[in-house]
Amino acid sequence: MSSSFFGDLRVVLRGPRFRRLFGTRLVSQFSDGIYQAGLAGFVFFNPEQHTSAAAVAAAFAILLLPFSVVAPFAGVLIDRWPRRQVLLLSSLAKAVLGVITAVLVAQGAGPAFFVAALLVLSVNRFFLSGLSAGLPYVVPRDKLMMANAVTPTCGTAASSLGTGVGLAIGMLGGEEALGTGIVLFAAALGFAVSGAVSLTLRHRELGPHLEEEPEEVRTAVRNVVRGMLSGIRHIGERAQARDGLATIGAHRVLFGVSTLLTLLLYNNTFTGGGVAGLAGFSVSAALLAIGFLAGAVATPWATTRMGAGTWIASLLATAAVALAVFGLPFSPALFPVAGFVLGFVSQAVKVTVDTLVQRHVDDAFRGRVFSVYDVLFNATFVVGAALAAVFVPPSGVSAAVVGAMVLVYTALAGAWTVRARRVSGSGAAASA
């Protein structure tokens, strides 16, 4: 399977236009990792504070929910503005905001820090939507599955590497606010480089080409709210994309629960918090990232042999088993294994759904659809964190919550199994 992944990587890298978009992603996501290391150390593993479930959930809400309000408008602009410009301006905005957060941390942070940090993360979702909407312009349609496996996965690997670099910078800078400020400033420099790399793409190279669309589409794009609603209707009319996005939403709720639970375990139970908590959580996060990579490597190979629906069903069933076997003991030795499996499942499901969405929506709606995707991605994660804040104790140890997650994953797996059999049956009937 690894040979398949690297073979796919070699295939898509033959395209010079893809290489330019790919390079923009790698530099940006490497810098994202550095930024997130500084942010996590300051917000979640500050030795001066005891992190409760409610505090962690509130931090996620502050950093993620505001974007869920503005993202629909961003999606319409992605369908209207040259997407190369979206990548460039997003990168430059992140660079400026990164410098601002670095200065604010060095001066003692405060509410302004959270405002600037949430703006960085919000603009980043804008950036990632532009990458997804522009990808079909730089790879042939029949290479989309392998491109969707390669690009986000390599981006995740770059982000993980960036996180490691950020942690190393933080250790050299010390636990004081100045050390975190240096980490955030390094990330800002990376964002600026990402903007420079995006200039290797031509102004209109990533679309949209609205002159090729009917007049009613151009009219819809001029109206932000109507355009967003038309994007939602567009998803509703395409069962493959609709079912995939619904599954992503349910999975992200569960992922939000597991993320908060993991943070609490490493901050309050497995360790005493501070640098030890961050180091332990980083090990778990590293295994999660390796799982991401393995899931993306396996997906193109698996979907050619069993179909997207069967693959998703098997993934969700695997998540249920892993949580029951490796999660319920709440062991510091076993829990990271559950993280690896959830990373595998998360990325494999996402790669499959990304491809379903890209294949089954029209280009004129693609930016809005991926902004709906991003809203769903963020909002459902926060919903999961909020649910965990209600039901998970400060220790992070809750067999009832993990057991409920196992049941939900099992139900989702069953639903996709039924769906896959129905699709297979209808296909066999049509060919008879």
Image: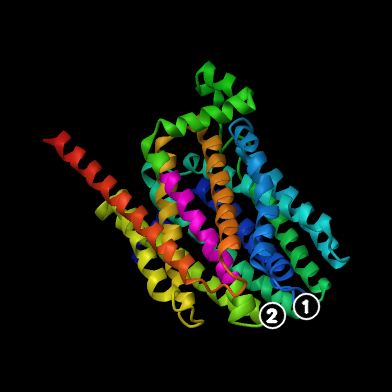
Outermost residue on the right side: it is: 107
Say if 374 sits above or below 426 in the image.
below
Relative placement, left or right, of 116 versus 227 is: right
For marks 2 and 1, the one nearer the N-term is 1
Camera-side residue of 355 and 313: 313
Inspect this view and state whether residue 62 appears.
yes
Residue 227 percent coordinates (x, y): 58, 27
Mark 1 lies on residue: 175
Q: Which residue is mark 2?
A: 275
Task: Find residue 261 and report its image quarter.
Answer: bottom right
Looking at the image, the residue that sits furthest to the top is 215
Label 1: element kind:
loop
Q: Is residue 259 magenta?
A: yes
Callout 2: SS: helix
Main SS of the magenta part reads helix
Q: Viewed as shown, does residue 243 lie left or right of 426?
A: right
The residue at 58%/65% (across/down) is 260
Spot occupied by residue 138 in the image (x, y as percentages of width and height)? 49, 43
Rendered location of residue 131, percent (x, y): 56, 46
Q: Is 73 rendered above or below residue 146?
A: above
Q: Residue at x 54, y 40 (%)?
A: 372
Q: CA distance from mark 2 to mark 1?
A: 8 Å
**Split into 4 quadrants, where in the image is the N terminus?**
bottom left
Please, what is the three-letter code of the amino acid marked with disc 2?
Val
Magenta span: 244-263
CB-based contact (under 8 Å), mark 2 and mark 1: yes
The residue closer to the viewer here, 195 or 224, is: 224
The answer to which of 122 and 260 lies nearer the viewer is 260
Decide: few, some or many residues near mark 1? Use Cα within 10 Å; few <14, some 14-19, many ≥20: some
